[in-house]
Amino acid sequence: MSTYEEKLSLLSEMIAFARIDGEIHEREYQFLAIVASQLSIDKDVFESLFEHEAEKVAIKSEHQRILQFYRLALLMHADGVLHENEQIAIREMGINMGLSPFAMRSVLQEMEKSPTGLIDPDIMLALFRAQHN
């Protein structure tokens, strides 16, 4: 992740995604706070993103787009409830990021099979790479 603006954009996108089901569950908030910390976003700035969205910045790197898709998928599973609106939105967001619908579906299926909802990063990248052939 190269710029502060990109980091704010990613986090803002995640906050908007968390609101799709009508509320931000406590576990979703905690996950977002962890991501903000990992992105070196101050708590005050993080809190302000709930009131004012950051300017949207397109992610150029495919690797970063895949990572953002995975963050969104983890966020989708954070509250333990998979809402239909979340499933529709994550597919639309992934397509808008230029990701393969087949790879996205495979990643989401692997996450559903996993008892923890996590998948190995190498497996995730392999699922996306397989669609390049």
Image (tube, rainbow, N blue to C red):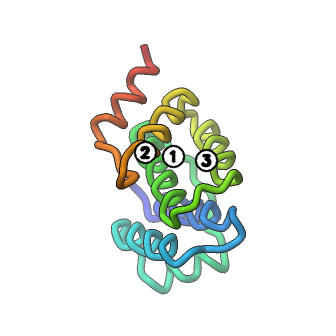
Q: Spatial distance from mark 1 to mark 2, Cα to Cα? A: 23 Å
Question: Residue 114 placed where, x, y %?
Answer: 37, 46
Mark toward the start of the polypeptide (3 vs 2)? 3
Indicate which label's residue lies in the foreground, 1 or 3.
3
Residue at 48% from the left image edge and 64% from the top image edge: 78
Element type where label 1 sits in the image: loop
Q: Few, some or many C-alpha atoms within 10 Å of disc 2 (few <14, some 14-19, many ≥20)?
A: many
Q: Quadrant of residue 88?
A: top right
- Answer yes or no: do the residues labelled 1 and 2 have beta carbons within 8 Å? no
Amino acid of disc 1 = Ile
Which label's residue is closer to the chain start, 1 or 3?
1
Q: Residue 72: percent from the left, percent from the top?
A: 51, 54
How far apart in space, not on screen, are marks 3 and 2 (Cα)? 14 Å
Residue of label 3:
90
Task: State which quadrant residue 15 falls in.
Answer: bottom right
Q: Secondary structure at mark 3?
A: helix
Question: Helix, strand, or loop for circle 2?
Answer: helix
Q: Which residue of the protein is positioned furthest toward the top in this rendering?
A: 133
Mark 1 — residue?
59
User: Could you tell me which residue is drawn at 41 percent across and 80 percent down?
Assistant: 42
Position above or below: 46 against 89: below
Residue 111, label in figure = 2
Q: CA distance from mark 1 to mark 3?
A: 16 Å
- 60 and 114: which is toward the camera: 114
Q: Amino acid at mark 2?
A: Met
Amino acid on which disc 3 is placed:
Ile
Q: Is residue 4 above or below residue 109?
A: below
